[in-house]
Amino acid sequence: MSENYKFNQNRKCEYFPCHKGIKEEDFNCLFCFCPLYMLKDKCGGNFKYTHGFKDCSECIIPHQRDSHAYIMSKMKMVTKIAGERE
């Protein structure tokens, strides 16, 4: 199985690549908006708070070629938080 669903690139995006530190051919756009944002300090990424907002501009976790497995490993936490907000 090729598992192409785990990697996507949008080279036509005006921001591509939007983060430094990843080879262009390995830059994954699948999680353009990180689904782990709501996990705050439990996301595992490199972030800081700026004026009370989470700034993920230095984080490359969702944009690495092999990020799919890591993101999926955290989805139970995301689902739990989403369920608490209902």
Image: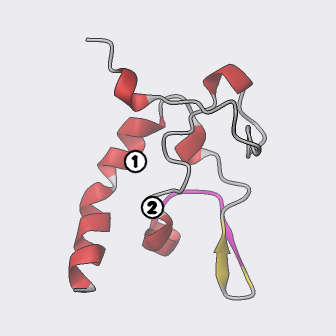
Q: Secondary structure at mark 1?
A: helix
Left or right of 12: which side holds 33?
left
* Residue sticking out furthest to the top: 1
User: Which contiguous range is marked in magenta?
Assistant: 43-49
Left or right of 6: which side holds 50?
right
Amino acid at pointer 2: Leu
Label count reads: 2
Magenta stretch, main secondary structure, is loop
Residue highlighted by disc 2? 36
- Quadrant of residue 65 in the image? top right
Q: Position of residue 21 (x, y in %)?
A: 76, 37
Label 2: how many Cα within 10 Å (few below 14, some 14–19, many 20+): many
Label 1: how many Cα within 10 Å (few below 14, some 14–19, many 20+): some
**Residues at marks 1 and 2, CA–CA distance in whole angstroms:** 7 Å
Residue highlighted by disc 1? 71
Q: Is residue 56 above or below residue 16?
A: below
Q: Position of residue 7 (x, y in %)?
A: 47, 28
**Closest to the observer: 63 or 48?**
63
Coloration of the structure image: secondary structure
Q: Residue at x 45, y 72 (%)?
A: 38
- Mark 1 and mark 2 in contact? Answer it, CB < 8 Å: yes
The N terminus is located in which quarter? top left
Q: Secondary structure at mark 2?
A: loop
